[in-house]
Image (spheres, rainbow, N blue to C red):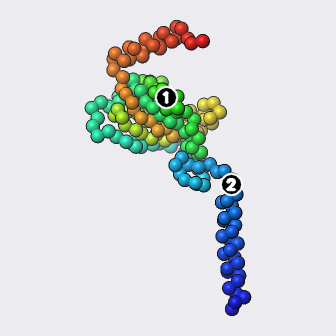
Amino acid sequence: MVKNMFLPIGLISLIFFGYILENASGAKRKTERGGGKGKKYKRKELPHDASLQVGVKHRPASCSLMSEHGDWLSVHYEGRRYNDGKVIDSSREREEAFTFRVGLGEVMSGWDKGLQNMCVGEKRKLTIPSDFAYGKVGAGHDVPGDATLVYDVELIKILGDDEIKQEERWIGIEDQYPKS
């Protein structure tokens, strides 16, 4: 009877020490943002023709003005690849909000569709399949073709007419006198 007990105890010990050695080896792993130690972050891309996913992360208690087609929006965002979480762009890192007109094709169609009817101060998470992003072509070395992208976007401001004129004047001056 004593001989038979050593086999299960030895097997359990081998499994336990194998686990300890594997996790203590110091090998670096990709981790999901905020996902904790050792949690692997690798997912398959969404199908290129999947639906745009719009999640509301924060909505202000009151909303007197919502974004509409053609509005000038000022936003902060962080964009990352869906499959591995690598950050590809961030207005917060540059400490400069991004300004554009929504719904007019100035940005990827996932933004044009996903940022409609948004309140100032609202935060959304957009999961954008490639058909609504950069398609089969991709964008540079950080965004391969058929890549699904995830953007966390906060609407900072919907620009009024006087601010739009100021923005257009600044853009016009910048075009005529580029920085060297």
Q: Which residue is mark 1?
A: 95
Instruction: Tell me what residue is drawn at x 51 percent, y 12 percent.
Output: 174
Q: Position of residue 156 (x, y in %)?
A: 39, 30
Closer to the camera, 178 or 108?
178
**In the rendered view of the protein, which quadrant contains the C terminus?**
top right
Above or below, 19 against 33 in this view is below
Tell which of 37 and 103 is nearer to you: 37
> Circle 1 sits in a helix, a strand or a loop, which is it?
loop
> Farthest residue toward the right?
3
Task: Name the residue type under label 2.
Answer: Gly
Position of residue 21 measured from the top left corner of the image (x, y, whole percent): 70, 63
Q: Quadrant of residue 73?
A: top left
Distance, label 1 to label 2, CA atoms, is 35 Å
Quarter the N terminus occupies: bottom right
Residue at (44%, 36%) from the top-left corner?
153
Position in image of residue 151 (x %, y %): 49, 38
Q: Give the residue drawn at x 53%, y 51%.
A: 35
Of labels 1 and 2, earlier in sequence is: 2
Q: Is residue 121 left or right of residue 86?
A: left
Residue at the disc numbered 2: 26
Query: Which amino acid type is shown beneath numbered disc 1?
Result: Glu
In the image as oriented, which residue stretches furthest toward the top? 176
Mark 2: give few (<14), some (14-19) or many (20+) Cα within 10 Å: few
Q: Is residue 121 left or right of residue 143?
A: left
Local SS, label 2: loop
Residue 173: where, in percent of width, then height? 48, 9
Disc 1 crowd rating (10 Å Cα; few below 14, some 14-19, many 20+) is few
32 versus 78 height, above or below = below
